[in-house]
């Protein structure tokens, strides 16, 4: 490993230098500018701008809806990963390929089509609205689109782990007299849990920042269906740069905090699946 | 998040029921619930895009796409993407070479920082450039004095898109180049190849699937980005509206069918991206099994 430092391969200085330069110009300096603007505010100004009633309502919706979406995906994502890996059935490959669709579909298109599906004349809304289930212009709609955009994370994180589960262990449990449910809860679930939590955290992080799909379906009513990223855009349109900066700093801290948690979770999950254990 | 093109190792067909398998009715119930969930959340929204887009017939659909402002949006999206993808491609190749082939201090930090744009909300990504280059921004007054327009113009759209799509090529290529090691390159150099020859003829061909997949993902995200470009665009019709922004404007003008017509192009792009992914996985699997047979 150490020998690579003195590798005969050329281009190390050039490529590493370019990597750091490009990273700085595109990502680090612009993000640094935001931090600088945020530090420019006095603490009391920052607190006042970041905790207005309207901002607090938008945090509640953003984090609450993201949590609901990530939990939905933790349940259905686990089910999907299990079904797609363990069972053979017609259409399995098609469904497996489709799981990546939310990564590929522009979020604006997702928002547009979900808003139309759940409207009173839409394919789903015409049956659901008479039952009192309203998807368009409600917090429920926000949860639905956030579930869509964060759908692949749990499935794709979990699939390789389910593939590598040793069936022999399950068979041993069966030989020892455990029923399928007992095997699932005492053997399979504990093994999968760290990875499910990692996938859940990835989905949650993705859902917090989402903007494109939500603006179409939520109606963006202050205090009711307005998410935090939308409030940032509102502040910018009012040329309230300080207000936008304070809100963005809160979102950025939440994202980076989650990133640290996810990294720690991945280390934890890998500990369970390292070859030595 | 899916890493490089995965090689599928499953597909073990089981004909006799095993102790590690659920009883048939549980199995089929689970399959039915999964299929229903994916139908409601993925297939129905996709089918709805095309149903709405063609709701008023072919003629209306084509007219909606030929409308001058929409046409301008399509051209702008292609321009932004044509600048963004090569920039991030060059970066991805440089980063993957440095990180995949060499050991150095700060490597873990560098890899974490490259992923950073994924953790940032698209709106915040747009905002940072407004804070730098906007009228009240840090460099705003200087730019105005010199008559340089970045925000509410093409450079701003490109910067925001480059930021958002920054990690795609790099994170597909880094694991591939790491897995390759450097023995083949060393052999080529020993046999007298130059550094560039080695890169073009030895390294790139064996990393091609990861490279293509990275480019395709970067391209899809660049064309479809909404939040970040929305903040820096200024929404000047016919000038700074990209396709996703055009979708929003048509929708807010109650021109829903035209909005869906533009959206259908973006949905086709997503389907194309998925098709390429499936194709690459299939090729990678075939090469893998061929390599094992040898």
Image: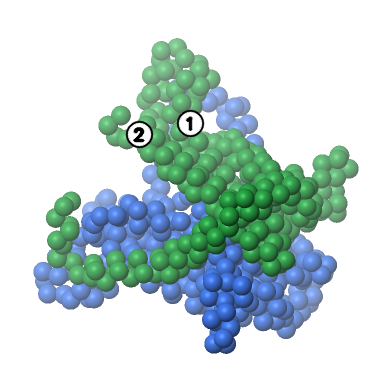
In the image: residue B131, left or right of residue B102? right
In the image: residue A199, left or right of residue B256? left
Q: Residue furthest top?
A: A177
In the image: residue B3, left or right of residue A1? right
The chain whose colour is blue is B
What element does badge 2 sit on? Answer: helix
Dot 1 or dot 2, earlier in sequence = 1
User: CB of mark 1 within 8 Å of CB of mark 2?
Assistant: no
Q: What chain is tagged by disc 2?
A: A
Residue A71: x and y in percent read 61, 37
Q: Which residue is mark 1?
A: A193
Q: CA distance from mark 1 to mark 2?
A: 13 Å
- Give me the residue at 14% from left, 61% from top: A6
Colour convention = by chain
Is A147 or A186 nearer to us in this picture? A147
In the rendered picture of this protein, how many numbered marks are placed on residues?
A: 2
Residue B77: x and y in percent read 60, 75
Q: Colour of chain A?
A: green
Residue B122 lies in quadrant? bottom right
Residue A209: x and y in percent read 60, 53
Q: Which residue is mark 2?
A: A271
Above or below residue A87? Residue B251 is below
- Give me the residue at 49% from left, 73% from top: B84
Above or below residue B147? Residue B260 is above
Residue A107: x and y in percent read 64, 59
- Give me the residue at 85% from left, 54% from top: A121
Is A52 or A67 nearer to us in this picture? A52
Q: Would residue A253 be seen by someone viewing this image from the given angle?
A: yes
Above or below residue B55? Residue B155 is below
């Amino acid at each position: 490993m150490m020998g690579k430092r003195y590798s005969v391969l050329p281009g190390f200085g050039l490529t590493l230098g370019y990597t750091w330069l490009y990273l700085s110009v595109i990502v680090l300096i612009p993000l640094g500018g935001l931090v600088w603007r945020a530090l420019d505010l006095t603490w009391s100004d920052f607190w006042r701008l970041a905790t207005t009633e309207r901002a607090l309502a938008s945090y509640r919706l953003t984090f609450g809806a993201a949590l609901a979406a990530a939990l939905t995906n933790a349940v259905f994502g686990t089910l999907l990963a299990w079904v797609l890996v363990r069972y053979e059935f017609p259409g399995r490959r098609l469904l497996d390929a489709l799981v990546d669709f939310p990564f590929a579909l522009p979020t604006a298109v997702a928002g547009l089509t979900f808003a139309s599906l759940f409207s009173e004349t839409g394919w789903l809304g015409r049956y659901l609205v008479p039952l009192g289930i309203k998807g368009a212009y409600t917090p429920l709609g926000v949860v639905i689109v956030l579930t869509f955009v964060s759908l692949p994370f749990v499935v794709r994180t979990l699939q390789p782990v389910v593939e590598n589960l040793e069936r022999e262990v399950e068979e041993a449990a069966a030989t020892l007299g455990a029923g399928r449910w007992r095997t699932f809860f005492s053997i399979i679930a504990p093994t999968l849990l760290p990875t499910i939590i990692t996938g859940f955290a990835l989905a949650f992080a993705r859902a917090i920042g989402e903007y494109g799909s939500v603006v179409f379906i939520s109606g963006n009513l202050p205090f009711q269906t307005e998410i935090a990223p939308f409030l940032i855009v509102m502040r910018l349109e009012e040329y309230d740069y300080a207000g936008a900066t304070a809100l963005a700093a809160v979102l950025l801290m939440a994202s980076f905090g989650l990133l640290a948690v996810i990294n720690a979770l991945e280390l934890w999950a890998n500990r369970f699946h390292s070859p030595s254990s | 998040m899916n890493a490089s093109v995965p090689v599928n190792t499953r597909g073990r067909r089981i004909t006799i029921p095993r102790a590690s398998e659920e009883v048939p009715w549980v199995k089929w119930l689970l399959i039915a619930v999964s299929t229903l969930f994916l139908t409601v959340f993925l297939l129905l929204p996709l089918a709805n895009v095309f149903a709405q887009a063609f709701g008023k017939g072919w003629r209306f659909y084509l007219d909606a796409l030929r409308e001058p402002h929409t046409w301008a949006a399509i051209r702008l999206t292609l321009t932004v993407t044509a600048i963004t993808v090569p920039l991030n491609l060059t970066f991805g190749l440089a980063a993957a070479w440095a990180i995949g082939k060499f050991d150095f201090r700060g490597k873990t930090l560098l890899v974490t920082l490259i992923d950073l744009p994924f953790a940032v909300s698209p709106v915040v990504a747009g905002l940072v450039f407004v804070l730098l280059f906007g009228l009240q921004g840090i460099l705003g007054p200087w730019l105005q004095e010199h008559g340089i327009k970045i925000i509410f113009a093409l450079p701003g759209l490109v910067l925001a898109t480059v930021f958002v799509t920054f990690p795609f090529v790099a994170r597909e290529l880094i694991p591939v180049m790491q897995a390759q090691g450097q023995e083949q390159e060393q052999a080529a150099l020993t046999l007298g190849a130059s550094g560039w020859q080695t890169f073009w003829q030895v390294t790139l061909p064996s990393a091609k699937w990861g490279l293509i997949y990275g480019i395709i993902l970067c391209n899809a995200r660049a064309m479809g980005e909404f939040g970040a470009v929305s903040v820096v665009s200024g929404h000047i019709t016919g000038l700074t509206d990209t396709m996703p922004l055009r979708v929003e404007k048509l929708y807010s003008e109650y021109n829903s069918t035209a909005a869906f017509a533009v959206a259908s192009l973006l949905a086709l792009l997503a389907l194309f991206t998925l098709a390429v992914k499936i194709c690459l996985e299939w090729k990678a699997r075939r090469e893998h099994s061929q390599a094992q047979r040898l």
